[in-house]
């Protein structure tokens, strides 16, 4: 059995699309997993312990050039702290949002990331936005409004946003800033830099963890909460990242990035299957808006 597993991993390591499908299933399931863990483990506890698990794994599986890369990264401590802080804050928002909104909403709002990156690139680097891309951005942002209105457009006059949806959207936006800043990182491998950010996130999440305990808000993990912690610690944070980075090495970032469009529908489907959430017609329309907006932005926008 172990030998069969080894042969599978050897084959998978050279098959970019297999790695991407596995990664998108892992990332797509993230929203249903953290939604299922709501009330089973508190947000700051899962954020801190998640990075603690990653830090332990890094200790044993650090890349060979880890020490040499550290010399380059520590030359810009403020940059590293800022990146780790954004990662920590983004995580905290996601796990807090899971207490207030559905896994379907979490999954669909996650799909707004590519479009927010286009807006961020325009603001930060004056990247040109073609009319087709502008239309794609408008379509994807319309999905946010539709979700907020609960599918009832007449409710837009007295619209009140669900705090969970707002936190998820803020988390996605913050992560987009993180991605845009990656270009300014020290000249080290993506994996090495991920290790440094993970260690920094673990350190920066410690005060939040302590505050949560001191405030009496901590929920120590139940069996379900512990399972969710293992999932986000090892599958989402480590294997998903490693598989995606390996796929990028094999076929390039542009082709690999398209696969991320699969994550929202996978997450929504898993929420229906395993959590029994109701997938309404407006969810379908919202999903079509965000995926259509991404497709128009990426395909027609480039032309």
Image (cartoon, helix red, strand yellow):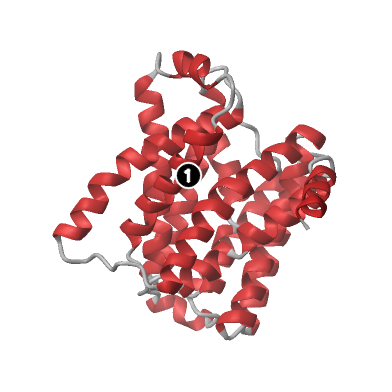
Image position of 195 with respect to 219: above or below:
above
Whether residue 300 is visible to the viewer of this picture, yes or no, is no
Q: With 156 as the anchor, is 114 left or right in this view?
A: right
**Front one among 151 and 189:** 189
Where is residue 218 drawn, in percent x and y? 24, 65
Question: What residue is disc 1 on?
Answer: 54
- Give SS at disc 1: helix
Dividing the image into 4 quarters, which one contains the C terminus? top right
Q: Residue at x 57, y 65 (%)?
A: 107
Image position of 275 with respect to 165: above or below:
below
Q: Residue at x 47, y 34 (%)?
A: 59
Q: Residue at x 45, y 73 (%)?
A: 224
**Front one among 292 and 21:** 21
Q: Residue at x 45, y 34 (%)?
A: 197
Packing grade of label 1 (10 A; few <14, some 14-19, many >=20) is some
Dividing the image into 4 quarters, which one contains the N terminus? bottom right
Q: With 289 as the anchor, is 42 left or right in this view?
A: left
Where is residue 135 drawn, in percent x and y? 68, 53
Whether residue 133 is visible to the viewer of this picture, yes or no, is yes
Q: Quadrant of residue 118?
A: top right
Where is residue 126 drawn, in percent x and y? 57, 29
Q: With 213 as the anchor, is 51 left or right in this view?
A: right
Where is residue 253 drawn, in percent x and y? 73, 36
């Amino acid at each position: 059995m172990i030998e069969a597993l080894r042969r599978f991993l050897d084959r998978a390591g050279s098959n970019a699309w297999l790695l991407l499908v596995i990664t998108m299933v892992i990332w797509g399931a993230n929203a249903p997993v953290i939604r299922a863990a709501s009330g089973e483990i508190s947000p700051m506890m899962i954020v801190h312990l998640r990075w603690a698990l990653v830090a332990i794994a890094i200790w044993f599986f650090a890349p060979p050039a880890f020490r040499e890369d550290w010399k380059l990264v520590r030359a810009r401590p403020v940059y590293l702290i800022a990146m780790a802080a954004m990662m920590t804050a983004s995580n905290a928002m996601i796990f807090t949002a899971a207490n207030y909104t559905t896994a379907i909403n979490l999954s669909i709002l996650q799909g707004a990331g590519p479009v927010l990156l286009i807006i961020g690139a325009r603001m930060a680097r004056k990247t040109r936005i073609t009319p087709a891309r502008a239309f794609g951005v408008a379509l994807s942002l319309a999905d946010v409004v539709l979700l907020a209105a609960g599918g009832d457009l007449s409710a837009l006059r007295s619209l009140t946003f669900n705090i969970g949806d707002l936190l998820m959207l803020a988390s996605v936006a913050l992560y987009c800033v993180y991605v845009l800043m990656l270009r300014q990182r020290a000249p080290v491998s993506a994996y090495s830099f991920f290790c440094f950010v993970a260690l920094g996130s673990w350190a920066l999440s410690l005060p939040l963890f302590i505050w949560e305990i001191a405030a009496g808000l901590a929920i120590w993990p139940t069996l379900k909460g512990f399972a969710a912690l293992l999932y986000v610690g090892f599958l989402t944070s480590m294997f998903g990242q490693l598989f995606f980075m390996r796929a990028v090495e094999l076929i390039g970032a542009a082709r690999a990035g398209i696969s991320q469009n699969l994550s929202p529908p996978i997450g929504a489907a898993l929420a229906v299957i395993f959590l029994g959430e109701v997938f309404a017609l407006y969810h379908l329309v919202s999903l079509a808006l965000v995926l259509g907006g991404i497709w128009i932005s990426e395909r027609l926008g480039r032309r």
